[in-house]
Image (cartoon, helix red, strand yellow):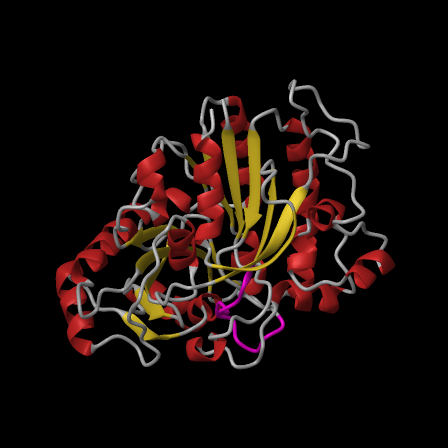
């Protein structure tokens, strides 16, 4: 049975897209390259051999100086299977990676929903509404009426900063903190000891009902946090996304998809198996091993720590360490591949931590695929994130 594994390294962009300035990114973001430069290199031999680093504009000279293989020089993964299903020896040359950059085409935005939807064939012609000056008062008043309490905030802000600014007042009043970002999002932050997480989710459901055209925001996001004004506030792993339902797409066609992380939420769970929600890269790794032991034909995973914990916090060194940790996991994953497996690595947008902004960035994304003989070597720049989904679909149709 052919099996496809698509892993999204959330926020790991590969250079400014041609339309980056239209999306508020005029300063040439290049997430992977700038993380490499800020950290003085990234110890990621598996990502280097796959071509993922090369796709992120890291040159062969830089790879060699760092003691890393270039994709042209690298041997096939030691666990890559031959046609009989036996592991390949490192000297086998007929199995290799294909790698390149994917250019975003969808005008929906530069966030995870738009990126994942485009991978599955949904290309939007119009952007979702954004609110750099906060939401319309009429919308906020309707939300407050429905939840029977006032709100705080109503402005574009960094999520980690606004809870520091308003967390104390929120604890005094019980009023939820409402804010947005450069993306089309209606975010609600509440302290877990003041507003129960389940009640926060109910509020988000109400916001999803209220946010209808012309205020059809792409996502409502629950942002629970803990802490105190004295010690500071910290977001917890109870985040939950409430996106708009997607148009019909490749997930619907394949069905019974094993989603890891936020992925099922981005598609309103349509077409996905019921599996426990995981909230961090280490949790995703554990669930990946479970998925590989299952009978799932398509495993679709999002590893968000690059974006959530480091990109949005302008922490380039933490971003680099996170990539190194992922590389270790990738080495283990490669050992577990079997005959008929396709492995695709890509991203959904950029989030350059060296930029002054803490927002996502409109970028090409790296792409690397193993197990697709017709897509090997340097593929250059390819139009559309849907290229990743098309390779998955083509692979799964082979029997």
Q: Position of residue 270 (x, y in %)?
A: 29, 40
The prevailing secondary structure element of the residues shown in magenta is loop
Instruction: Identify the residue at image location x=30%, y=58%.
Output: 220
| The stretch drawn in magenta includes residue 362 | yes
Residue 349 sits above or below residue 140 on the image: above
Q: Quadrant of residue 56?
A: bottom right
**Of 279 and 287, which appears nearest the observer?**
287
Closer to the camera in the image, 319 or 376: 376
The magenta stretch spans residue 356? yes
Number of numbered discs visible in the structure rendering: 0
Magenta segment:
354-365
**Nearer to me, 243 or 123:** 123
Residue at x-position 24% and y-position 55%: 203
Residue 10 in the image, given as x and y percentages of width and height = 52, 54
Which residue is at 53% across, 44% downward? 7
- Could you say which quadrant of the image residue 336 lies in? top right
Residue pictured at 61% horizontal, 38% vertical: 373
Image height of 259 relative to 98, above or below: above
- 16 vs 95: above or below: below
Measured from the top left, where is residue 337 in percent x and y? Answer: 62, 29
Residue 310 pos. (x, y %): 59, 61
* Left or right: where 323 falls relative to 192: right
- 247 left or right, relative to 327: left
Nearest the viewer among 309 and 92 is 92
């Amino acid at each position: 049975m052919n099996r496809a594994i698509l892993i999204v390294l959330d926020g790991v962009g590969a250079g400014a897209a041609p339309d980056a300035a239209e999306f508020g990114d005029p300063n040439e973001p290049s997430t992977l390259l700038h993380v490499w430069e800020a950290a003085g290199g990234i110890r990621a031999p598996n990502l280097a051999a796959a071509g993922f680093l090369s796709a992120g504009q890291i040159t062969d000279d830089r790879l060699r100086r760092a003691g890393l293989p270039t994709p042209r020089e690298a041997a096939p993964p030691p666990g890559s299977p031959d046609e009989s299903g036996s592991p390949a020896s490192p000297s086998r040359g007929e199995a290799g990676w294909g790698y390149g950059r994917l250019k975003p085409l969808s005008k929906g935005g530069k966030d995870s929903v738009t990126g994942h939807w485009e991978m599955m064939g949904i290309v939007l012609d119009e952007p979702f509404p954004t609110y750099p000056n906060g939401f319309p008062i009429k919308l906020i008043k309707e939300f407050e009426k429905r939840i029977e309490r006032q709100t705080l905030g109503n402005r574009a802000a960094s999520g980690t900063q606004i809870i520091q600014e308003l967390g104390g007042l929120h604890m005094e009043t019980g009023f939820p903190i409402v804010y947005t970002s450069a993306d089309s999002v209606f975010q609600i932050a509440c302290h877990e000891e003041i507003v129960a997480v389940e009640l926060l989710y109910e509020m988000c459901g109400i916001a999803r009902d209220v946010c209808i055209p012309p205020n059809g925001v792409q996502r409502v996001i629950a942002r629970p946090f803990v802490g105190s004004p004295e010690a500071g506030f910290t977001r917890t792993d109870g985040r939950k996304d409430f996106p708009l339902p997607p148009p019909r797409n490749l997930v619907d066609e394949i069905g019974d998809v094993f989603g890891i992380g936020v992925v099922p939420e981005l598609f309103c769970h349509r077409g996905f198996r019921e599996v426990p929600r995981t909230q961090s890269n280490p949790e995703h790794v554990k669930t990946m091993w479970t998925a590989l032991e299952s009978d799932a034909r398509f495993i679709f995973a999002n590893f968000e720590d690059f974006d959530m914990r480091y990109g949005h916090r302008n922490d380039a060194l933490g971003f680099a360490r996170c990539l190194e940790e992922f590389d270790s996991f990738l080495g283990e994953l490669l050992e577990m591949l079997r005959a008929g497996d396709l492995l695709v690595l890509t991203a959904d947008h950029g989030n350059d931590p060296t930029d002054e902004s803490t927002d996502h960035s409109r970028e090409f994304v790296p792409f690397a695929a193993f197990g697709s003989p017709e897509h090997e070597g340097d593929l250059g720049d390819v139009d559309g994130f849907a290229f990743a989904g098309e390779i998955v679909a083509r692979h799964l149709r082979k029997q």
